[in-house]
Image: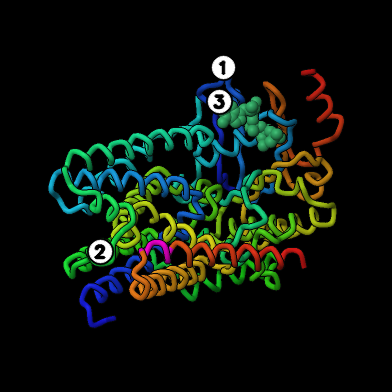
Amino acid sequence: MVSEPILQINHLTAGYNDAESPVLKDLNFTINQGDFLSIVGENGVGKTTLMRTILRQLKPLKGNVDYFPSAHAVNIGYVPQFRNIDSEYPLSIRDFVGLNLTGFKLPWLSRSERKRVNDMLVHTGLQDLANRPMGQASGGEKQKAYLAQALVEEPDLLILDESTASLDPVSKNELLNLVEEINQKLQVTVIFVTHDIALAKKYASKFLLLAPGTYVSGNIDELTNDKVWGMMESHV
Amino acid sequence: MFNFEFMQNAYLAATVIAILCGIIGVFVIARNMSFLTHTLSEIGFAGASFGVFMSWPPLNGMLLFTTVSSIIVGQLSVKPARRENVISAISALFIGLGILFLSLSNKNASYATNILFGSVIGISRADVWQISLLSIVVLAVIFVIFRYLKFDSFDPVGAQVKGVNKQILSIVFLILLAFSVSVAAQIVGSLLIFILLTIPAAVAKYFARTVGGMMLLAVIIALIGVWLGLYLSYVTNLPVSFFIATIEALFYFGALLTQGSQKSV
Ligand SMILES: Nc1ncnc2c1ncn2[C@@H]1O[C@H](COP(=O)(O)OP(=O)(O)OP(=O)(O)O)[C@@H](O)[C@H]1O
Ligand SMILES: [Mg+2]
């Protein structure tokens, strides 16, 4: 099977209007349907900026991002790097996951929507905790709930922005096993932003390594520690 | 007590207002808008005295002032850190204006206390209809935008990712809040509206786990406050807003206490 692209990044220059210089320059890159892509790079190199550009929260300064078959047809689920859920946050995990089912519809969820929420809770192993307030969930449980919330809308592309950063090694693997299963069974394309090279190598099929002013991409087995350190050091 | 038409009217109006405030309040609390609600009630005072000055019904003046100012506040995309100061300045300005209009209108001081503290006797059957109609409009809009409002209020980061139009949503909500403030002021007065708009929902947040549950609980707490408050006011001849404020405050402190003991277990 020849893989079809889902996203094509053409001569993309991205960043913030008020910044003196763009964060990313002349980036060219294709993501195919079903890819599990890992994006690595040091703090501040522009990973989140790239994700926000893909999500159309930021306009490209130059170049463009093409979506296939069309921009409207690609449903993107995003688990952002930061979220403000404090310990007094009242909603149950179940209600939190259901928030993503929007539209000008009846306030309460339909039977089929409730089933979708439930399926995702089962999928992410949260069914026993479904009625616990989000504020009382552990860091790992929260991450799973964020994932379930993003998945409940059945995205074609799932973006995880350092979703594993605060997790212990066991929970990290647990979460990524889940993502791997979703990638393989549901054919959801995954972009996984991380600092953990070992984790990227274990789960991803491709990589994009960002460094200030430059980047490399390829199949995951070409991603070596030497390469990462080489790229970073050449800019120190 | 229900033999008197003014008590019937007061109970009807209070019931509608409690339902409205309980529901809107859940979003006020989730969106951290208690402070702004307080300011809107002061703006409502200015609007009501402007109404009196113009020889309009006070409610119309309130609706005008609170709606216009909530649109202005919605447009001020100032940084959150500076927002409270800006709002304080706006509210100072409006209290000043309220006092000015009242003194220009040559109405006696009891008119001012009615606006500030609400009044039970002053509510006619026509007022009840107007209050109900406005409340139905507000609740109907909430019904239509419910899922977006809920997402944006309870998970702003997630809603932004989803591309929910925050700007439009927050202006629509501010206008709904302005309407609610004006309506609620009819019974508790502009000084104490924020009590019905914030405390029942704040208490409900401690005990409910779903948005629907929070609304139900907030409505119940608001209803207990106004029903009991009206009764006590009737029996003792003391101001109804005093009783409502006291009952709601007791709910809040009670919730804090039970919450505190739960956490230490
Ligand atoms: N809203 C903003 N306005 C202006 N500049 C910004 C904004 N957000 C981020 N930046 C800048 O853009 C650059 C890239 O930031 P970005 O968040 O994309 O980095 P990152 O690779 O995700 O880093 P990290 O690994 O720490 O998450 C940084 O220099 C940052 O200071
Ligand atoms: Mg980042």
Q: Which mark is residue B131?
A: 2
What's the residue at 55%, 39% (across, down)? Answer: A54
Camera-nearest residue between A228 and B112? B112
**Closer to the observer: label 2 or label 1?**
2
Please indicate whether residue B60 sits to the left or right of residue B117 in the image: left
Residue B146 % position (x, y): 41, 61
Query: Nearer the observer, disc 2 or disc 3?
Result: 2
Q: Amino acid under label 1?
A: Glu
Q: Which residue is mark 1?
A: A20
**Quadrant in which residue B224 is drawn:** bottom left
Q: Secondary structure at mark 1?
A: loop
Residue wearing tag 3: A13
- Report the disc number at residue A79: none
Q: Nearer the viewer, residue A36 or B161?
A: B161
**Number of marks in the rendered image:** 3
Q: Is mark 1 within 8 Å of ligand 1?
A: no
Give me the chain letter of mark 1: A
Which colour assignment does the render follow?
rainbow
Q: Residue at x 46, y 54 (%)?
A: B28
Element at label 3 = strand
Task: Give the foreground label among 3 and 1.
Answer: 1
N-terminal label among 3 and 1: 3
Query: In this rendering, would B260 be left or right of A68?
Result: right
Task: Estimate the spatial distance between the alpha carbons at disc 3 and disc 1, rounded to whole Å.
Answer: 13 Å
- Could you say which is closer to the camera, residue B133 or residue A128? B133
Estimate the x, y position of residue A131 in percent, counting from the top left. Answer: 64, 71
State the extent of the magenta-drawn residues as a range. B239-244
Residue extending furthest right? A226
Q: Position of residue B169 (x, y in %)?
A: 39, 49
**Residues at marks 2 and 1 touching, judged by CB atoms closer than 8 Å:** no
